[in-house]
Amino acid sequence: MIAEEKLKILTESAKYDVSCSSSGSKRKNGGGIGNGYPAGCCHSFTPDGRCISLLKILLSNDCIFNCRYCPSRRDADCPRATATPEEVSELVIDFYKRNYIEGLFLSSAVHISPDETMEKLLLTVKKLRREYNFHGYIHLKGIPYADRALTEEAARYVDRMSYNLELPSEESLRLLAPQKSKEALLRPMKELQKSRLVFTAEKRKGLFLPAGQTTQLIVGASPETDGHILRLTQSLYRGIGLKRVYYSSYVPVVHDALLPEKPVGERREHRLYQADWLLRFYGFSAEEIVESGGNLSLELDPKCAWALRNMQIFPVEVNTAPLELLLRVPGIGARSAYKILEARRYTRLNFEHLAKMRVVLKRARHFVTAGGKFFGNANPAAVRGLLTAGEEKKNAEQLSLFSDAETALSAHTGEL
Amino acid sequence: MIYFYDGSRESFLTAFLLAYPDEEACLTSSGRQLAIGQQSIFVRADPERAKRAEKRLREIDPDCLDELDLMLRSGDRDKDRTLFEYFRLIAARGEPVRKMLAEDAVSAADECMRRITFEVHRFHGFLRFMESASGALYAPISPDHDICDLLVPHFRTRLPQYPFVIHDVKRKKAAVYDGSHTFLAPLEKAEVALSADEAEWQKLWRRYYASVNIPSRERLAQMRGYMPVRYWKFMPEK
């Protein structure tokens, strides 16, 4: 059994990686323990609101690299630990059978050399799959600069692999992670994607990264705009076929003259995720969402902001609008759009029906008509005001007294 | 008229057949206060009547009987009304209605079923096994809906070598997998002798849970939203 202190060190070094999902793999239980869960499954939630799906640990936090944002970098004065493949395997099996976890997320600091580290990771996942007969989910972090043959072999055993780009531009990488380059991170992703396509095309036996690849970008440690980040994201989805891009707002765990002292507001991260969803599920392009040198609005969600810039399209009639257009209406999500399509085949829908289908009328009413009726405000400036007022109240980071008309009024009347 | 039924499928179908023509009918399976002057009858399951109702419903919409089985598991307070109105609409229209989502009866039934299947999904994650001295796994749960047997196929596929018991302590019953067969049994209380390592693994899990959290980003409301407090009781990390 792994020592408690070792588990603590290896977990704390891994926890800033935000990737958590266990979705996308239909791996079958081949007579041992475990199987895939295509929809993904959360097993617990921590007080920071994040889900625990996989056991997320490093094999070692003893690093030869010296990336300035990283708490495990070579020069950092921190406790070091290295686990053996046996310790990790045993931990996975015992946590898994108690239903604590959906599988393993294994990463490592670059210990001794990239190849040596990758070999050790490969050894661990092979042990789990072969000796322990484990068929649950495994997400393996790729080690940049490791030999391609090792990486491709690992891809045959795990469900998902990821390389973290971390910084959204070459310049920032050079400055903050001088031993990494954008090309060194993108190359293995492209190679894996190519091999995966060949593997599928040749209908070879077994699995090759059934849940694909993902990456992570740190937001706010470097000066890139949201426009830049979303264009990069879009090219990763379209060009390399990544399943997901994660965004991690920068948390200053390390003090360094080149890094900001203050954490980035979580609102920015939230807006990036909203925009990411628009790219993947709502048919938007990065160019529509934000101009290249610009940032997303913090007050308005990106769909509202887009709609307000394109008021000539609205209002749309919910009884006739095609799905693509319904999906672009603020307040109508993918689920309610589908419900509208089904329900309107039987009845002419009105606003009451929409409310029942969980359409958020507070936003949607300015952009739709139902049975020819319109209950919104036709003036874009007024709509912007109405929508931001609500947002600010809900998400305000710091409320000042009498900050909006309503509170000011209630202060006068004494009705709080 | 109020029609009491015992919560079983057969008795629901019997009561449904009786209540259907009655405009003022109300169906219920739980004790409730009667308003003065309200009449009520207790409907005993009648296999012949139930079969007739089932046959007719199957002709109209073969899938609606699975929906009935699912909704009968609901722990919602107004599930009887949801069920009755949904099946009344099916019978009245004479066609499948599940996509008429603008109808109150349909959206209520849709939500009712979603709550049950969602809870099954949640317990795929939130259920916690402990290892007994014999190696069999034991998990107590206290779900909103009557779902303990619905959890079995998932864990059986996943852990075929481990016999397990999923114990619904609220409804005092258990779904059991003995290594080859599964069955349901009444179970009041279980005395489980834990394996030698069980406490150590739970301790390691608690350590992991504490270590993976980022304290500077505390968002308790979000945590509780995703993992409601009522589920915490049997989770060693909480």
Image: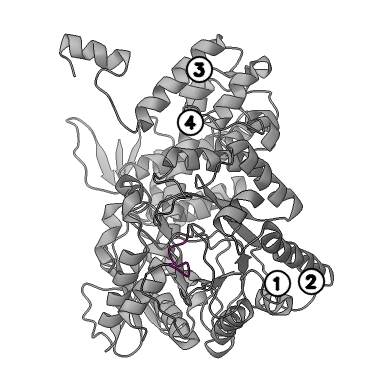
Mark 3 — residue? A384
Residue depicted at 53% across the width and 63% down the height: A22
- N-terminal of the pair, mark 2 or mark 1, is 2
Mark 1 — residue? A208
What's the residue type where badge 3 is placed? Arg
Residue A214, position as x, y percentages in the image: 62, 59
Mark 1, secondary structure of its residue: loop
The answer to whether dots 2 and 1 both sit on one chain is yes
Q: Residue furthest right?
A: A202
Whether A73 is among the magenta residues is: yes
Q: Are marks 2 and 1 in contact (CB under 8 Å)?
A: yes
Chain to which the residue tagged by mark 2 belongs: A
Q: Which residues are magenta?
A: A70-75
Chain to which the residue tagged by mark 3 belongs: A
For the residue pair B165 and B57, the one nearer the viewer reads as B165
What's the residue type where badge 2 is placed? Phe
| Disc nearest the viewer among 4 and 2 | 4
The answer to whether dots 3 and 4 both sit on one chain is yes
Q: CA distance from mark 2 to mark 3?
A: 50 Å
Q: Residues within 10 Å of mark 1 (few under 14, many from 20)?
A: many
Mark 2 — residue? A199
